[in-house]
Image (spheres, rainbow, N blue to C red):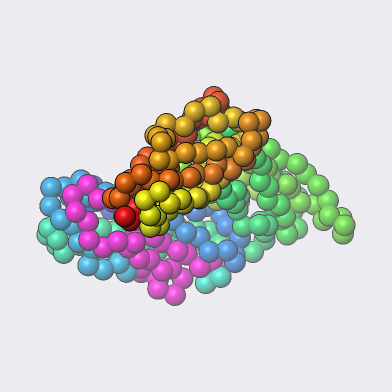
């Protein structure tokens, strides 16, 4: 089954004088991140993706932010063989600053040669609005469904600040704004983000940008993260049936879950020793398969079962079976 991650990023932020790009700069997908206007309080996190596109091993010797009081940064993995990937993660503490703040992150390499890369993170910490919750957190979502998440934005200014637009970075995300009032008569804006059903499988990190009629608050960033799962999942995806004697019997159960009701149409990889029985012949979102092993000879058993369903997309899943058969 297809697995991949999509990370949506903004254009580069101009910072400092132009310099010739080094081999180390070329390892990064991007060199800067602008978080825009943000309420004071929530932590801002961004991964700067790195891929070793050289023919030599690469080693990150140190990661240091220019403002250690307001920003922490670290490398998820420091040593990369050719083709390997990692990230330098930057985390800004918005309680530590007010107004515009730009932090430089110095990433030093000592292999294959010494080099230093400078990354920039910038944000405008404000106390005149809040976002609750901090972002659109969907959690795990089945592909093919169209869930919604919402945040409430409240402005605390003397002027008549209005939210005028909400735009997602990805066409797979649709947004909507609704003006409301709470029990105390305070105006707030409910911003909804809805996922399209054809969003690809993988972990998505994106932003929704809000616009207002206040020239000093031109855009507000609301982070969005979601993990899109295949329409068909299996638990567990590997079954160890332990030690079984010849002519003995071992039994295990696996659970199939679908984004919508389905039927199991075929199971490949079964034989006279290994059988499977579905808990139902009806179309349902959850099926329990009972696997039964009755081995006829000693030795190691390793099988891959392929379970095929009548779902229109991503309609099959594999499960690994292992056992040790004793005389």
Quadrant housing residue 129: bottom right
Q: Residue at x 61, y 60 (%)?
A: 39
Q: Which residue lies furthest to the bottom in this view?
A: 69
Expressed as whole percent of the image width and height from the top left, the position of residue 23 reads 18, 50
Magenta-drawn stretch contains 82 = yes
Residue 139, visible in the rendered structure? yes
The number of numbered discs placed on residues in the rendered structure image is: 0
Q: Residue at x 44, y 46 (%)?
A: 293
Residue 6, visible in the rendered structure? no
Quadrant housing residue 270: top left
* Image position of 184 (left or right of 253): right
Residue 43 position (above or below residue 179): below
* Image position of 282 (left or right of 36): right
Residue nearest the viewer, comparing 40 with 272: 272
Q: Which residue is drawn at 28% across and 50% down?
A: 299
Expressed as whole percent of the image width and height from the top left, the position of residue 258 reads 58, 37
Q: Which residue is drawn at 13% across and 47% down?
A: 55
Magenta-drawn stretch contains 93 = yes
* Image position of 307 (left or right of 288): left
Expressed as whole percent of the image width and height from the top left, the position of residue 225 reads 53, 49
Q: The N terminus lies in which quarter of the figure?
A: top left
Expressed as whole percent of the image width and height from the top left, the position of residue 189 reads 74, 48
Q: The C terminus lies in which quarter of the figure?
A: bottom left
Q: What stretch is highlighted in magenta?
A: 65-94
* Image position of 172 (left or right of 130): left
Residue nearest the viewer, comparing 153 with 102: 153
């Amino acid at each position: 089954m297809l697995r991949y991650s999509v990370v949506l990023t903004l254009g580069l932020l101009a910072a400092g004088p132009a310099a010739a790009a080094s081999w180390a700069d070329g390892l990064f997908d991007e060199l800067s991140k602008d978080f825009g206007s943000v309420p004071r309080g929530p932590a801002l996190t961004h991964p700067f993706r790195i891929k070793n596109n050289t023919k030599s091993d690469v080693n990150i010797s140190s990661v240091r932010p220019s403002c250690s009081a307001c920003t922490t940064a670290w490398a998820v993995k420091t040593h990369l063989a050719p083709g390997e990937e990692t990230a330098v993660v930057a985390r800004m503490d918005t309680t530590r600053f007010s107004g515009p703040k730009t932090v430089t992150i110095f990433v030093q390499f000592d292999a294959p040669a010494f080099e230093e890369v400078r990354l920039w993170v910038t944000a405008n910490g404000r106390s005149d609005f809040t976002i609750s919750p901090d972002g659109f957190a969907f959690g795990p979502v089945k592909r093919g469904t169209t869930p919604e998440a919402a945040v409430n934005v409240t402005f605390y200014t003397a002027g008549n600040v209005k939210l005028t637009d909400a735009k997602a970075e990805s066409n797979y995300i649709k947004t909507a704004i609704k003006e409301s009032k709470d029990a105390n008569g305070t105006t707030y804006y409910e911003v909804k983000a809805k996922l399209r059903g054809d969003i690809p499988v993988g972990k998505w990190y994106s932003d929704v940008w809000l616009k207002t009629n206040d020239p000093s608050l031109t855009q507000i960033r609301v982070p969005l993260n979601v993990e899109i799962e295949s329409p068909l999942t299996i638990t567990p995806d590997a079954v160890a049936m332990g030690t079984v004697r010849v002519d003995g019997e071992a039994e295990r159960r696996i659970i199939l879950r679908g984004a919508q009701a389905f039927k199991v149409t075929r199971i490949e990889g079964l034989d006279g020793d290994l059988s499977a029985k579905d808990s139902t012949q009806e179309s349902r979102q959850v099926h329990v398969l009972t696997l039964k092993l009755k081995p006829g000879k000693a030795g190691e058993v390793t099988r891959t079962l392929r379970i095929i369903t009548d779902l229109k997309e991503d309609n099959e899943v594999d499960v690994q079976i292992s056992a040790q058969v004793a005389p």
